[in-house]
Image (tube, grey):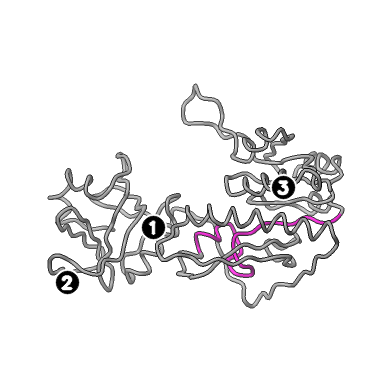
Amino acid sequence: MRIIFMGTPAFAVPSLQAIAAEKTLFEIVLVVTGKDKPRKSKHADAEPSAVKQAALALGLSVYEVDDVMDLDFATTVAVQRPDVIVIAAFRILPPAVYEQAALGAFNLHASLLPAYRGAAPINWSIIKGEKETGVTTFFLQQRVDTGNIILQEKTPIAPDENATNLTRRLSEIGAIVVVNTLHQIASGSVNVSGQNDALASKAPKLSRDNTRIKWEQPVAVIHDFIRGLALKPAAWTTFQGKTMKIFSASLPTSFATEMPSVSSGTAFVEGTRLYARGIDGWLELLSFQLEGRKPMEASEFLRGFRHGAESAFFV
């Protein structure tokens, strides 16, 4: 079976490697990924995508693309005569590209579709307090993330699991599901099911506007918000006039001293611990990065900011 694989970030790498491991059944004729990204240093070489690095390590041919709507890209795909196109964390493809696959093109999506259609399903599943998520493979069609479902695999979300850790787990689960999907296509045993649009929810692209913490909420909601955006891009707030990215927090069950009854967003220091007030209680901030400084734990931060923190607010 001739396969074109399309993906860019680390999430897609286990799937690529799993397909490549089954050389007797699957031939990866081309790996398509995004262009190398410029580094901050003028003297450093551009940074290849995680998928490009993995593909080159496997000795596979790589094609970098900027504009998936370019007709030359569709021609490049057609020349390879793919039986199947496998997509994992890539761009939205036009029909002129994905219809080149003789047996179909399918996508690996990091949610249990139709839940969390969109660019950031892992983040939003945690932000919304879900206790379970998973991965889905589905055949592409013109409306994004709406195609017929091939396979799904569920997994629980741990109470303190963040988006970085869940992404890593789902990438490994997804690799197994991708290979199983290919086996079904190869054997002609695919049994698809349609998506119920009435049950659909959205997972929009993350931006500075929708990653800012709103302290006038229950602390459990804020905790999920922080977990869902950690470690990147990270939930943020302002503290003493500077942007602060918060990477981890916890819901304390007890305190050494009586906590004051104050307004949401109030900061409070107890020994080497830093707390922030939500609408219904306190959240302990464990690790973060203040604008202009390196990431640090609360105890390190408070050695230099203790007195200012005791009378400050998160905004």
Query: To which quarter of the image does residue 136 belong?
Result: bottom right
Q: Residue at x 80, y 51 (%)?
A: 84
Which residue occupies 72% across, 67% down? 149
Which element is circle 1 on? loop
Q: Is residue 236 above or below residue 75?
A: below
Distance from Cα at disc 3 to Cα at disc 2: 57 Å
Residues in magenta, as a range? 103-124
Q: Residue at x 79, y 54 (%)?
A: 95
| Amino acid type of the residue that numbered disc 1 sits on in the rendered structure | Arg
Q: Nearer the viewer, mark 2 or mark 1?
A: 2
Sooner in the amino-acid sequence: mark 2 or mark 1: 1
**Residue 104 falls within the magenta-colored stretch:** yes
Res 203 → quadrant: bottom right
Q: Say which mark, if any, is on residue 212.
A: 1
Q: As drawn, which residue projects farthest toward the bottom?
A: 198
Task: Measuring from the top left, give residue 110's x and y in whole percent.
Answer: 60, 59
Q: Secondary structure at mark 3?
A: helix
Which amino acid, mark 3? Ile
Question: What residue is disc 3 on?
Answer: 19
The foreground one among 76 and 190 is 190
